Image (cartoon, grey):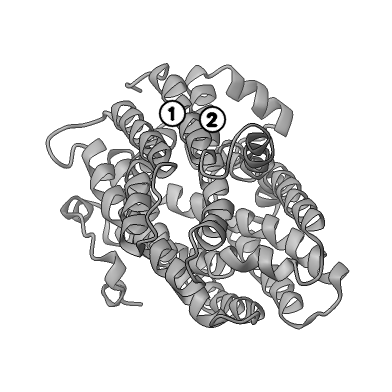
Amino acid sequence: MHIAAFPFLLYYSPSMTTRPASRAHMIYTVAVIGFIYTLHLVIPMYSNSSFLSLFADEATVGYIYMAGAAMTVLGFLVAPSVIRRLGNYATAIWLIVIQAALFYFLVTSSSPYVIATAFVLQSAIISMIGLCLDIFLEVYTDGEHVGAVRGLYTATLNASWVIAPLIGSMLINGTENFRNTYVASLAMLFPLLYLVYRNFPRFKDPNYSHHSPWQLIRHASQNRNWIELFIANLILQIFYAWMTVYSPIYLNKTMGFGWEEIGIILMIMLVPFPIVQYPLGRLSDGGHGRRGGEKAYMIAGFALMGLTTIALAYIHSTSLVVWALALFATRVGAAAAEVMMETYFFKTVSPRDSAALGLFRITRPLSYFFAPLVTSIGLIFTTNENLFIVIGVISLLAVIPTAMMKDKF
């Protein structure tokens, strides 16, 4: 396939020409696969809760999300042993096939029990596919270009977050046709399956470590930088989870925006990710004359993210432009913090540490346990508007573990 045909990969790094052509080709291929994978994930994301509410009450929907998060944590814990047994290529193929079957049930079933079960299982499968893609990318990444590669990959994945909410809102089209988003996501799985099948049949698995989940936790707890990074990443994921669920509801119910307008706001809000992350990744590799500095950029990113989120509580305008720009500012900081954490972490692990990768990614499902607590506990003491102050202060707390990390490897 010709990668140049994909405009979102125009972030070309001259330094990548120093790699063997096959390695550069595989890195770009994984980025394209990651884009399609993320698009299939995000298109239904902002309407998932609305779809589930057609079959269950609000409390039950919350339990379904929590069950999905618990299943995802379990998936990350068992994934390393599955990958060691089957290999990363075969694991990825089977996971995509299973995911397609689960989305088929979401599209066709009218049984609340089948829909709830399929939703919980697909939550875990999605994350496990992402872990397989992490391993593919890590194997083809050399130590001199971790920042550039991770910046490219993260920016490419986040580019799909920019367009997916708008696609989702267009598919729903102001109605309750939420299944249309699952149809689109199911369709995305076929090119995803083909690209993995076509490009990685000769993939050579590294000699994966054989840590049990508890051995890994003990091993990771002995690395002070990993502990601090885990805490900071958990805070970032709580920010993402809370914003994903709460901000569209706030814009709709409190500020009075229609879902078409919300789709535009979300699209603009997410633009910083593809713009900011690749240049910062290259910068950490010395792409602009300076190498390292992940810690400083993380601190600056969290500080900006927290302060701009707090400022949202004081915005009373109903202007689409004002809210789009305000939310845009919060994501500039989040994008910087995210890509620097990705770069920092992947400079300290090898492809054989599939269990460590899973442990790092567990922060995402864990955040869906903590994010609802921000709302439920926060509303006991304050108003809807002031919840932005609460999540902003929590974001600022990430500066503390980040500042305690070592800036050199």
Along the viewing direction, whichever of 307 and 361 lies nearer the viewer: 307
Instruction: Give the residue at mark 1.
Output: 396
Along the viewing direction, whichever of 285 and 51 lies nearer the viewer: 51
- Above or below, comparing residue 328 to residue 36 in the picture: above
Residue 315 in picture, x, y percent from top left: 39, 47
Does residue 114 appear left or right of residue 384 in this picture? right
Q: Is residue 265 visible?
A: yes
User: Residue 230 bears which disc, if any?
Assistant: 2
* Residue 300 location, quadrant: top left
Q: Residue at x 76, y 72 (%)?
A: 54
- Above or below, comparing residue 63 to residue 267 in the picture: above
Q: Residue at x 75, y 60 (%)?
A: 121
User: Residue 28 bears which disc, if any?
Assistant: none
Residue 182 in picture, x, y percent from top left: 63, 76
Residue 213 in picture, x, y percent from top left: 71, 33
Along the viewing direction, whichever of 255 and 68 lies nearer the viewer: 255
Q: Is residue 95 visible?
A: no
- Determine whether label 1 and label 2 are within 8 Å by CB: no
Rendered-image quadrant of the C terminus: top left
Q: Residue at x 27, y 72 (%)?
A: 7
Mark 1 nearby-residue class (10 Å; few <14, some 14–19, many ≥20): many
Q: Residue at x 12, y 35 (%)?
A: 289
Mark 2 nearby-residue class (10 Å; few <14, some 14–19, many ≥20): many
Sequence-wise first label, 1 or 2: 2
Q: Residue furthest left?
A: 289
Label 1 secondary element: helix
Give the mark toward the camera: 1 or 2.
1
* Residue 406 location, quadrant: top left
Label 2 secondary element: helix
Residue 279 in picture, x, y percent from top left: 23, 48
